[in-house]
Image (cartoon, rainbow, N blue to C red):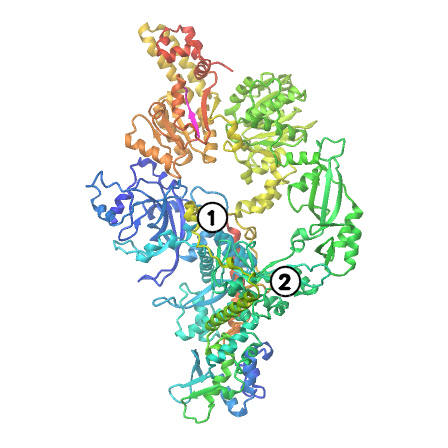
Amino acid sequence: MTNSSTNNSEITTALSNEGLKDQPWWVEQWMELINSYRFKKRLERAWTYAREGNVTSIRFEGRRVHARVQGTGEDPYKVKLWLDVLNDEDWRYVLEALTQKARWSAQLLAGIMPADIERAFAASGRRLFPFKLQEVRSECNCPDKANPCKHISAIYFLMGDRFSEDPFVLFQLRGRSRSKLLEDLAEQRREALAAMAKAAESKSDSAKNSNINQVSPAQPHPAVIEPSLWWKYEGNLNADLVVITPAMEGDSGLDSAGDLPLAEEPKFPEARQIFLNHLHEQRINLAQQAMLQAMAAGE
Amino acid sequence: MVDAADQQRTPTSRDPSHDFCVAAMSLLHATWLPAIRTPTSSGRPALLVWADTWRVATPAGPGATPALHPFTLEPEDLRVWLHEKDLLPDGIIDATACLTLPSRALKAKTKGKPSQNESTTEEIIESNWTGLPLQAGEPIPKKCEWWPWQVQGLAVEPAAATTWLSKLPLSGHNSDLGEELRWWSHLQRWALSVIARGRWLPQVELSKGEGYPHRARWVPLLNREDDRRRLEELAARLPLVATCALPWREPTGKRSNRITRLRPEAMRAANPVASCRPRSGRLRVATLLEELVDAQLRQGFESNVEDLDPLLASWQKALGSESGVITLPNEEVERLATASSHWREGVAGTVAPARACLELFTPTEGEDLWELRFALQAEADPTLKVPAATAWAAGSQIMQLGEIRVEHPGEVLLEGLGRALTVFEPIERGLDNATPNSMRLTPAEAFVLVRTASSQLRDVGVGVELPPTLSGGLASRLGLAIKAELSEASRGFTLGESLNWSWELMIGGVTLTLKELERLAGKRSPLVLHKGAWIELRPNDLKNAERFCTNNPEISLDDALRLTATEGDTVMKLPVHSFEAGPRLQGVLEQYHQQKAPDPLPAPEGFTGQLRPYQERGLGWLAFLHRFDQGACLADDMGLGKTIQLLAFLQHLKTEKELKRPVLLIAPTSVLTNWKREALAFTPELKVCEHYGPRRPSTTSELKQSLKNVDLILTSYGLMQRDSELLETIDWQGVVIDEAQAIKNPNAKQSQATRDISRPGKSNRFRIALTGTPVENRVSELWALMDFLNPRVLGKEDFFHQRYRLPIERYGDISSLKDLKSRVSPFLLRRLKTDKAIITDLPEKVELSEWVGLSKEQQSIYRKTVEDTLDAIARAPRGQRHGKVLGLLTRLKQICNHPALALKEETVQEGFMARSAKLQRLEEILEEVIDAGDRALLFTQFAEWGHLLQAYLQQRWRFEVPFLHGSTTKAERQAMVDRFQEDPRGPQIFLLSLKAGGIGLNLTRASHVFHIDRWWNPAVENQATDRAYRIGQENRVMVHKFITSGSVEEKIDQMIREKSRLAEDIIGSGEDWLGSLGVSELRELVALQDN
């Protein structure tokens, strides 16, 4: 472990060797939230606690975060964290706002958390992200009366990274899973469209596109009509597959995918990088084997 | 049940000596077995390798379990066969799987023999359907149903399967391998490419349910445009047998008598309506690719868990383990699964039938801004598009894109736009409302889209359609538009001659002058409007155009031929976008590129025969290339009359007074007789002589002497090589090679000598090659042929090997093959007897006389027999003469077939073929028949000869040759006939005795009939011929009649032809006349004549 807990003037740097700039915005925002907390000393102790690997598990279960932290006792303490859930009314406003911009749905569908998502939540007067640390409700079964206790605070530090594994877990904490949200969004969009169509219809009834949605019954597979297709293959090898070439520098799938969004295990701060480096090394070996095999084809 | 099935599978009785044939007629298949959990396995997938073969089988139906596929090769036989072909995979176990196969409904034969089928009756009654599975290549019955069959084979574990698939040929047809194996080999090659390019990510796959473990998986990333295209290609062509396994599997390991019931839902799934929906192809292929990629990466990956936390350590360990099972608490695995899936999501989405598409439109006049419209586009066919509005309007309904069904079209479109945002930021502006349809781009943004973003967008799986003038590729680059015509004085006969030509610069389909280009380049904007079209200027365009203009080169007829042959050819490095030929030049080009049938040339004066219309075209073509001094290869199908066309061509030269020096014709010894005969019959004006035999000229002067006034001299390949020094001293006017495949091996001495002699001597030398083989498909053989005909076309052998042979033969590189074909096609003319245009020109039965000589051994036995027997006959009492004469004729005919027959030998000894000239020729022709995939009937009147021939042919080709003769039982006959007619990979050669097989059989699958020896009565021969031929039949039947020249066979032929009194006597009143022949008449009939 290279980083030490004495480096506490800027706690956040300890979370990543790269510093905050390369962090996704939600990690950044989460850390700001923690940094805005007044009782710095308590946080420092919790930080050490987290770094030493005392947090044994963090689970997102529905709207709650369940965690276990190994304290001084024999059994780990059970910690629960949760946010205030948005009610259906609030969600309706959020959905309506989200539907206004196709980009939001587009990004969510493509697995991207829109950086300006809070603007959609502002419509309901609520937030996706907690504004203050106090909004993060918590419970710990340790004897310490203070909240947050050091066990809860330790979880705080690890949460940001955990959001990266699946940023949509934030929606879940606010009461809607990603899939439910997307479903609702689609529904909302349909309603909006229907309303628009109705409005257009009342203006002029010429704009009718009735036959667009006519769906013909599923065609049987061609082989059902032509059974010899069961065996037939007349294709030629695609010209690009004649010579098998390696990836250009920086063009492999690993390169495109970038950092593995897996929260760091505090006791193994280098593990993720070692894992990726090893994959890269192996990728080159495996590519060479594949090319040798391809070259030997047809001999 | 198992017992009953075993009974069904009992093959027909077969001669044990034919054991090698059992598997030789089988066809190998491969079907993927998805992971199925059984008590003994955690559900590993496997590749089932199996083979079908021909047998007589009882129709069966599914009972408690699917019926056993009656035509599969037993695992033990399969192993032996695969081992023999060096195709035995590693890591195999015997396995039985349940496959859905197209089947033919057939009533079970239960009524006839109830006692025998007692054990199966119950089963048959239980199901209301009985039938047999169809085999690949079998004619498809009108009513075809899909039923599950238990198929026995070898299950290959995935990693071993990938190694095995890599070894399969990537191209060409192989008679032992099902076509779908080529599909598999292409899929595997794609998997190798995915691995080589590192287009994969490790993932975690959560358990599919109780009993299934969580697993670490390697998944391919299919976001790139080229990979998506490939997926569509392979999915569209997926041979369903590759994925037709149903969820049923007998317990692995040793076969047991356990009965596993097919689950009712799986049984229903065997019904085609439920089992094969079009949508599934893409997903199935993506899954198979994933299996292959996973297996290979898993095998090659070396895990190293040092310094890893427990989570990553178990993942990595599982990635390198054979089973991939991850052992971690559920919550931890779920975390890994979520994180890894989110990781992958950043690169590649899911496989869907449609994708988002951005269409760029040029600004309307006076406008600055470009329009970008959003649309939804079918993956399978990019031309199928609907505007975004339609997708929005579809709502939750399924949308129809042509025949393709898209579920949730709005979501598909949005997801694509979300991905588009990651590589082309400007579209963020366009997504500001709820259902965006289009947006505007600034010129700078449009340029970014055209130049760089379009390919990046395609790589994240978003379609991009650019205006046609900018749509990339060669056409939107600077190039030339050429107009050319022959000069007025020219007849277009010499390749080097200069053409009258003019050119313009062209970009994106619009022409422009150098001045205009300068002006446009001055605007310093990469996208410019010219003549109403937007075109893209590249930095070096002006410089290249200026360089071309200062040079102002000439182009020749040769250049014109080259530029019109292949697309994208260049003049001084500028691509030629359009080439407009004047009418006269166009005529020459079309003829040269064979875009139209060659102009016919009627038979020349002095040609004493009739040319069919296609033969006149062939003659015209030979004359056309001769004018250009280009070598020509006439590769017409056997029986279309190449000999006649060549003779007509020589006669044409002679009539035109262009034949001034002798022409050398080289042919296999076995056809020299035929050439002599045909020349005599069709071109009696040509003076033909032979350079053959021990008395042939051995010095230049002798040779020159013998060539006086000679037009055509015939020699064999062997003698040409032996006497090459002598033959090279003659200034030949032309060299013709017959059966040109004889020079296919470039390094053989014979081939080298032939090519040497084709080079110009003192004056030009025309080169013509004749062959009946599909030369254009035999890449390895093309070089030597072209080196003989036109050495410049394919260059040196090393170059040819690297540029064409290797990519085409090893990898089936279709673009190299196309290029090669376009280079050689002007010099090849091949018509098939099945071509529509040819069929109409051909009679339904084409009779071909195959003239052959006698080997030395045959000659001496023949002569001795004649002498001895004539003496004996002369001395014999009158009563015995008749029998003796008949005996003599029979014996002579036998000698003409083969000395072994006359000497009553019973086995085939070494050197068997060389002893009979007729057998040599027969083998040559059969080789072509077999190569072409045709089938032939061989008739002989001698059963002993049939047996010898059967043994010889089976040895020669290593496949079964059935022989139907007088002592064949009725049941055996029927089996032979059925098999010949119906087995998709049945025997190609069927031997029959003229008497036993001449009547009553229906053998219409044959397109060649051979009469190996002649019979007095043409009616008997015709009856036999009609086994293969039926009135109204589409196929033409080639009837080959062998005639040994100078022998009694020729006399018989002559008599039949001339319908002489003698023949009538023979046919009409039996053979009494024979006895009354005087000895001198008899001698006349049988004596061997030199000719």
In which quarter of the view is residue B729 placed? top right
Specify which label sits upstream in the sequence, 1 or 2.
1
Q: Position of residue A34 (x, y in %)?
A: 54, 86
Q: Is residue B454 left or right of residue B693?
A: right
Write down the quadrant of residue B278 in the picture: bottom left
Do the residues indicated by labels 1 and 2 lie within the same chain of the protein? yes
Q: From the viewer's perspective, is B260 left or right of A243?
A: left
Residue A82 magenta-highlighted: no
Q: Report the side of B378 relative to B505 (left or right).
A: left
Instruction: Give the residue type at disc 2.
Output: Leu
Residue B1010 part of the magenta segment: yes
Image height of A111 relative to B403, above or below:
below
Q: Can you tell which mark lies on residue B182?
A: 1
Which residue occupies 59% across, 32% down?
A: B633
Residue A1 visible in the current orientation: yes
**Name of the residue lying farthest toward the left:** B115
Amino acid type, callout 1: Arg
Q: CA distance from mark 1 to mark 2?
A: 42 Å
Tag 1 and tag 2, C-beta contact below 8 Å: no
Question: From which residue to which does the magenta span run?
Answer: B1007-1014
Q: Nearer the viewer, residue B1079 or A199?
A: A199
- Judging depth in this view, the residue of B715 and B442 nearest the camera is B442
Q: Which residue is mark 2?
A: B372
In the rendered image, the vertical position of residue A244 relative to residue B861, given as above or below: below
Find residue B455 and report its horizontal and vertical position in percent: 61, 60
